[in-house]
Image (cartoon, rainbow, N blue to C red):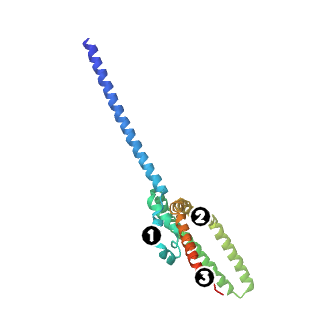
């Protein structure tokens, strides 16, 4: 009997602990769900907002707009800069892209110096060759120069091919960077176009004002014969 009582109490304690743990679990899930919902809502709100850059432009007023003949030298770049500041992943990508030209310049510096030195040599060699008056000797020397150039081209052919590939890849990257800026800023501009669309009633009221003014003026514009 005593053993059964102990087992019963142990069971009750176990059930109590399980209920308590379940309650804690449910509360935790609820809190996580609320947090995720809040973050999602904030993200959605941000994604629907007019870009701050364009808000600032609106605050400048019409006179400033006319003076500058538009939003500025590069509205896409301004929008993209704002997007970069609000997106850490995009910021990291942009920072990496800024390093690429320097990496290329540093890595190919010796190659360009080497090629330029050889080019200077061929130009100078040509000048020296042209100073020779003996036709036969000059002809033989020209053959030697061509052989030297061919040998040099063979030595650098692999390097030349690789550098040409790098130049081509660089153009591809430049194109993709331009496309990235456009695609990142298109939604931002759509938000502006949707959120800041002028109220047609305001424009209609202006038309009505002019119509009323014309109606009031017309009786005084009749030419008397």
Q: Which mark is residue 175?
A: 2
- The Cα atoms of the two marked residues, 1 and 2, are separated by 34 Å
Which residue, given by chain and number where applicable, does mark 3 sit on? 221
The percent coordinates of residue 154 (x first, y second) are: 65, 67
Compared across the picture, whether 149 is left or right of 109 comes to right
Compared across the picture, whether 197 is left or right of 148 comes to left
Q: Residue furthest front?
A: 225
Q: Name the one closer to the observer, 100 or 162.
A: 100
Q: Residues within 10 Å of mark 2 (few under 14, many from 20)?
A: few
Residue at x-position 61% and y-position 76%: 119
Sequence-wise first label, 1 or 2: 1
Image quarter for residue 26?
Answer: top left
Which element is circle 1 on? Answer: helix
Q: Residue furthest left?
A: 2
Q: Mark 3 and mark 1 in contact? Answer it, CB < 8 Å.
A: no
- The Cα atoms of the two marked residues, 3 and 2, are separated by 62 Å
Q: Mark 3 and mark 2 in contact? Answer it, CB < 8 Å.
A: no
Sequence-wise first label, 3 or 2: 2
Residue at x-position 47% and y-position 65%: 81
Residue 98 shows in this picture: no
């Amino acid at each position: 009997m005593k053993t059964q009582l102990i087992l019963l109490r142990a069971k009750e304690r176990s059930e109590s602990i399980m209920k308590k743990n379940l309650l804690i679990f449910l509360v935790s899930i609820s809190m996580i769900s609320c947090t995720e919902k809040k973050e999602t809502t904030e993200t959605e709100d941000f994604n629907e907002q007019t870009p701050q850059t364009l808000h600032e432009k609106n605050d400048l007023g019409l006179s400033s707009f006319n003076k500058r003949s538009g939003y500025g030298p590069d509205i896409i770049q301004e929008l993209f800069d704002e997007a970069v500041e609000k997106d850490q992943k995009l910021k990291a990508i942009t920072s990496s892209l800024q390093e690429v030209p320097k990496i290329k310049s540093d890595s190919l510096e010796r190659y360009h110096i080497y090629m330029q030195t050889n080019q200077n040599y061929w130009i100078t060699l040509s000048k020296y060759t042209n100073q020779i008056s003996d036709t036969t000797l000059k002809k033989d020397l020209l053959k030697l120069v061509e052989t030297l150039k061919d040998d040099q081209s063979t030595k650098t052919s692999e390097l030349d091919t690789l550098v040409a590939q790098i130049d081509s890849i660089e153009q591809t990257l430049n194109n993709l960077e331009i496309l990235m800026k456009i695609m990142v800023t298109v939604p931002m501009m759509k938000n502006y176009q949707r959120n800041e669309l002028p109220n047609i009633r305001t424009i209609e009221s202006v038309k009505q004002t002019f119509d009323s003014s014309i109606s009031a003026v017309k009786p005084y514009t009749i030419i008397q014969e």
